[in-house]
Image: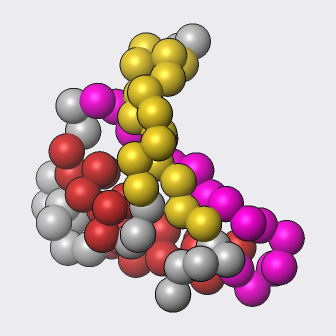
Amino acid sequence: ERFRQQGIAKEAVRGLLDAAKTSGEVEVVRGCTALTNEISKRVLRSLGFRFSAIVEDEEDGPEEVYLLDLKTSA
């Protein structure tokens, strides 16, 4: 609880995106989150991810899928 709302998740995702871009092997990154997880959706959108679809995960149930095209993102 005490680590929430400090930007840690956003910074971690940013680091992973930088590594993916640098590798030159990744074109699109997919982020999935529960339909009710507004904080995770906000993190994804703030990093440039765009909503793509709602899918049914066998283990977790329905999830929202967000995509980020690394070729066109800043």
- Residue drawn at (51%, 87%) of the image: 74
The residue sitting at 18% across, 61% down in the picture is: 4
Is 11 part of what is drawn in magenta?
no
Q: Is residue 49 left or right of residue 1?
A: right
Name the outermost residue toward the right: 25
Q: In which quarter of the image is residue 21?
A: bottom right
Viewer-side residue, 3 vs 62: 62
Residue 26 part of the magenta-drawn span: yes
Q: Which colour scheme is used?
A: secondary structure
The number of discs equals 0
Q: At which x and y percent is residue 3?
A: 21, 64
Q: Where does the image place residue 8, in percent across and percent down from the top left?
A: 33, 71
Give the side of residue 39 with respect to residue 57, left or right. Answer: left
> Which portion, as a residue range, is magenta?
21-35
Q: Taking the image as drawn, is residue 19 in sight? A: no
Q: Please, is residue 47 above or below residue 55 in the view?
A: below
- In the rendering, at what x and y percent does residue 56 appear? 50, 16
Identified at 67% across, 60% down, the residue is: 28
- Image height of 22 relative to 71, above or below: below
Query: Where 18 sits versus 16, above or below?
Result: below
Between 13 and 4, the residue placed more toward the observer is 13
